[in-house]
Image (spheres, helix red, strand yellow):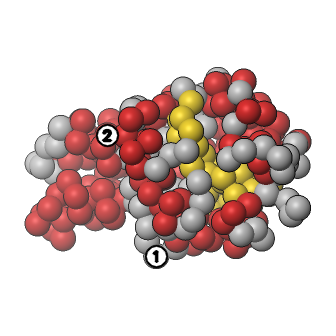
Amino acid sequence: MSQGAALFDIDGTLVDSNYLHVDAWQRAFHKVGHPVDAWHIHRGIGMGSSQLLATLLGDAVDKLGDEVKELHSEFYRKSSKLLRPFEHARDLVNTVASRGAKVVFATSAAPDELDRLRKTLDVEESVAEITSSQDVDAAKPEPEIVEVALQRAGVSADRAVFVGDAVWDVIAARRAGVPTIGLLSGGISAAELTEAGAIAVYDDAAALLHELDGSPLASLWRPEAAR
């Protein structure tokens, strides 16, 4: 059987960054005079920024969208010293790679944000391929980023498993034909992840690592493992 690929989201999945994004977006919306409740922002984390802005700004997106996006980048950059990997996130990535699966970071993060995330994780030797926002026209929940990840890994959808924390991850992967493991570390409930189509849900990277050989990821290196 061909080598399988583990496709990992990063924000909220491997790195504790979601609530830094919420804070940066909230500050940006406030700065332009269009305040948005934090819980609304959190619901959009994991979408591409264009989709998030269209959802939260509505008719004002053409007027304010670009300014809000620039301000978010500025505020997020200033808080980036608070970025850190979730417990055992590095161990999870390194172990999956050591078992023989290709590890792909399937993120639509902007290049500057991706650079900070990669430095925070520091697992470059275990990562076979990486995607970013520059690789697609439409970010999650559209399936393009997952499809690009599959192409770069050289695997079909039935030889891949996606690991993410947002409903948008699950929807994007499902549209590409890839099953998803959901993690609660991004702040979305198990019920919502499961309703969106996640085939298994774990608390965080550490919990998934602890149950790794009984998880859907094991099908990537053990053909007899159920998925």
Alpha carbons under labels 2 and 1: distance apart: 23 Å
**77 relative position to 23: left or right:** right
**219 relative position to 169: left or right:** right
Could you tell me which secondary element the residue under label 1 belongs to?
loop
How many numbered tags mark residues here? 2
Residue 102 visible (yes or no): yes
Quarter of the image that includes the N terminus: bottom right
Q: Residue at x 42, y 53 (%)?
A: 168
How busy is the neighbourhood of tag 1: few (under 14 within 10 Å), some, or many (20 plus)? few
Q: Residue at x 41, y 49 (%)?
A: 196
Q: Residue at x 77, y 71 (%)?
A: 154
Q: Amino acid at mark 2?
A: His
Question: Which of the two labelled residues, at mark 2 and mark 1, occupies the earlier sequence position?
Answer: 2
Badges 2 and 1: C-beta atoms under 8 Å apart? Answer: no
**100 relative position to 220: left or right:** right
Picture quadrant where residue 53 is located: bottom left
Could you tell me which secondary element the residue under label 2 belongs to?
helix
Residue 101: assigned label: none
Eyeballing the image, is 189 above or below 45? above
Q: Judge by depth and name the residue closer to the eye, 189 or 49.
A: 189
What residue is pinned by disc 2?
A: 42
Residue 127 visible (yes or no): no
- Residue 140 spot, x, y in % from top left: 44, 61
- Residue 83 spot, x, y in % from top left: 54, 32
Q: Amino acid at mark 1?
A: Asp
Q: Residue at x 50, y 30 (%)?
A: 185
How busy is the neighbourhood of tag 2: few (under 14 within 10 Å), some, or many (20 plus)? many
- Residue 126 spot, x, y in % from top left: 82, 47
What residue is pinned by disc 1?
A: 137
Q: Residue furthest bottom?
A: 137
- Residue 145 spot, x, y in % from top left: 55, 66
